Amino acid sequence: MALASASAPTAMVVCPHSLASTAGLTILQRGGNAVDAAIATQAALAVVYPHMTGLGGDGFWLGYQAESGELYGLNGSGRAGAGCDRTYFERQGLEAIPQRGPQAAITVPGGVAAWGDMHQRFGTLPWADLLQPAIALAADGYPVSATQAHWTEVNRDQLRAYGGGQNPFLPNGAVPAAGVQLINPPLAATLQRLAATGSQDFYQGEIAAQIIAHLAPLGGLLTKADLAAHRSTWVDPISTDYRGYRVCQLPPNTQGFTVLQMLNLLEEFDLPALGHGTADYYHLLVEVIKLAFADRDRWLGDPDFTDIPLAELISKPYGDRRRAELDMARAQHHTSPCLGGDTTYTAVVDSTGNAVSVIQSNYFDFGAAVVPPDLGFTLQNRGSLFSLEAGHPNALEPGKRPFHTLMPGLVLNGAGQPHLVLGTMGGEGQPQTQLAMLTRILDFGFDPQTAIDLPRWVWGRTWGEANTQLALENRIPTQVRQELERRGHGVTATPAWSEKMGHAHAIQIEPGKLQGGCDRRSDGAIASL
């Protein structure tokens, strides 16, 4: 879906819901820059896509400032509370942290703080103006999307158990049908308070007090002190060179470095000679994914707690050594951890050349399913991803950030300017989908929309189930699937436009030209000036 003028666009917003894209476009029309528009888009997504994102989740930002030529990153993920340690769960005889309920909400939501930090450093319009489109959507209502209706039905019992008697996601206790107008007055009031008092109210003001007042009687582990202590972290992006471009990601605790490893492994292969969509193409990409995931699972955690050999992992010599393990005739057999992922990705480019790549998430659909009364949003369950195994790089410790699947992407051209802004939701599928998009655009020359529309795959985890299957959309020809099976892949077919493959979005930037790509697996739109 496109919301654009007939002339060549000079600015663009792409995200998984058309109303949120419109919110970002409104800010651009009022003279805001890419950061302003991205904040407005994220706030609107918190209203109209509450099953995938919200004020109770984390966020990561990767961007480029045209005036200074600055490439920057912001880690907006929260840390485990000071009283959250493994012994608490071990005393209850648990082998894993619960995935839902108050005990899953053990990390501070960092997304709202990231909005405030981004605005303070780069914003141009007044903070309160950026939240107005979201406030209007929450107060006046919006039509429920098919995906929200679906995921509300899936999570109905969880939302009833932990969402309180006045749950805005279950009006009158029922799952809203697609197309029904839904209002969320508590969320409108929360956003209005943030607009008036600033993002820190979420951590040190009335909103913080309401979060803890709801969690404490339920056995929640977070405290007022945990919220007050939260800080975002400005980070230096990491990168590798590929086909004359500089592909950029954020450093751990995100899994972004896996894409850089994958590209280093692919660098010596002539992908056009293999042919797009052939068994060789899918086999090779899946095999490099397996190698990168093996390193990720061994090392990824909070770098403040784990000594990660990041420079070596993303180096060209390391890629050369690992490439020797690839076999074009046979599939490797590695195991994959169980990782979920419900997320929203937004790409924004403004008319002055600023670019923003941002991703925010509840982790699971509706997160922990805990909805503090009078606030109108769910708390994330990202902390349930921590391991309870001593010595594990992602083992739970107080003040530690968990392994994060969120990974916004940005590609610079040879002159060091943005060429591609890209990302996707999809948990463990995020690096796989980014790899598909990068090879299709940089190696094969497809435009962003075509690169997104072409059939996709995901290896390993499929929406909360750990396995080593290769899920292929059934639009991939039968003979290709059969050849991959012959090489040892455990192939399963999914529907033609499977949501398991994520919601991918991108903006490609060329002189005098912007091209957007929006995933039809989502409810999104390209909005442009």
Image (cartoon, rainbow, N blue to C red):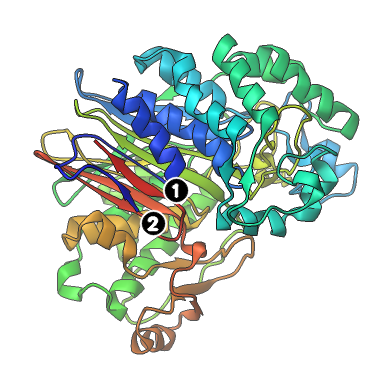
Where residue 501 appears, x then y in whole percent? 46, 62
The earlier-in-sequence mark between 1 and 2 is 1
In the rendered structure, find residue 16 and report the number of the disc placed on it: 1
Left or right? Give the position of 475 relative to 174.
Answer: left
In the rendered structure, find residue 473 and report the number of the disc placed on it: none
- Mark 1–mark 2 distance (CA, rounded to whole Å): 7 Å
Residue at 79%, 30% (x, y): give it: 373
Where residue 37 appears, x then y in whole percent? 37, 28
- Say what secondary structure mark 1 lies in: loop
Q: Are marks 1 and 2 in contact (CB under 8 Å)?
A: yes
Nearest the eye: 192 or 122 = 192
Amino acid type, mark 1: Pro
How many discs mark residues in the rendered view?
2
Where residue 454 appears, x then y in whole percent? 31, 68
Left or right? Give the position of 292 relative to 271.
Answer: right
Tell me if residue 309 can be seen: no
Nearest the eye: 82 or 406 = 406
Which residue is disc 2 drawn over?
A: 519
Nearest the eye: 244 or 182 = 182
Is 95 drawn above or below residue 9 in the view shown? Answer: below
Left or right? Give the position of 391 relative to 259.
Answer: right
Is 323 drawn above or below residue 416 in the view shown? Answer: below
